[in-house]
Amino acid sequence: MENKTFCEECYNKMLEKCSFCLRPINDRILRATGKPFHPECFNCIVCKKNLDGIPFTVDASNKIHCIECFHEKYAPRCYICRLPITPESGMEETIRIVAMDKNFHVLCYKCEDCGVSLSSNAENAGGCFPLDDHIYCKNCNYHHLKYLVNAQGTGLFPTNLNNQTPRSTDL
């Protein structure tokens, strides 16, 4: 093509076409996902935000998303608050807790009765003691079990929890 003269129509036919608008690209080419784009045509398919020079991701269909829209659409949802579980501001990794086949934000993973954090890095956390699809701390679980067993008239549970744990043989 060097040293050859072309009319404008022929020249435009030889140019790469934008994968979005299909018009010839006669200036700067932005390449992403193996395709050429005009920089102004490289936008999030959801919010239409221009992604030239901005981090982006693609879904399974190779459709372009800004990070925020991708998380909103595809991130796992917290069982408690129903919001997407995404990286905290300034972080790149997402931290989530999975218990009983459910996803939780670290701050949402707490006893349903008393609100104490059940996460292992929380102060005084004793872990999660699930019962009937609910998450409880050890103390609240004990009180629910005691109520259920005593409601059946068995009287198998001790009157206080101090250093006593229900044994499976007691049930």
Image: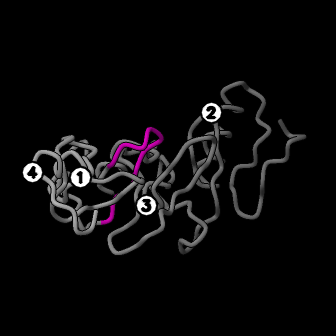
Which span of residues is magenta-colored?
55-64
Three-letter code, disc 2: Asp
Q: Which residue is mark 3?
A: 107
Q: Residue at x 53, y 71 (%)?
A: 122
Q: Residue at x 40, y 49 (%)?
A: 58
Magenta stretch, overall SS: loop
Q: Nearer the viewer, mark 4 or mark 2?
A: 4
Q: Closer to the N terminus: mark 4 or mark 3?
A: 4
- Estimate the spatial distance between the alpha carbons at disc 4 and disc 2, rounded to whole Å: 74 Å
The reply, left or right, for residue 7 in relation to residue 30 is left
Compare marks 2 and 3 and give the one earlier in the sequence. Answer: 3
Q: Which residue is mark 4?
A: 8
> Closer to us: mark 2 or mark 3?
3
Seen from the viewer's position, the closer of residues 13 and 64 is 13
Measured Cα–Cα span from mark 1 to mark 4? 11 Å
Please tell me whether mark 3 sits on a helix, a strand or a loop: loop
Name the residue beneath numbered marker 1.
Answer: 15
Q: The disc labelled 3 sits on which kind of residue?
A: Leu
Residue lying at 36% horizontally and 51% vertically, measured from the top left: 35
In the picture as drawn, the residue positioned furthest to the top comes out as 152
**How far apart are the two marked residues, 1 and 2, measured between alpha carbons?**
64 Å
Mark 2 lies on residue = 132
Q: Which mark is residue 102?
A: none
Q: Residue furthest front?
A: 4
Left or right of residue 133, residue 169 in this image: right
The answer to whether the residue labelled 1 contacts the one labelled 4, judged by CB atoms less than 8 Å apart, is: no
The part of the image, by quadrant, that contains residue 102 is top right
Closer mark to the observer between disc 1 and disc 2: 1
> Which is in the foreground here, disc 4 or disc 3?
4
Circles 4 and 3: CB distance less than 8 Å?
A: no
Q: CA distance from mark 3 to mark 1?
A: 53 Å
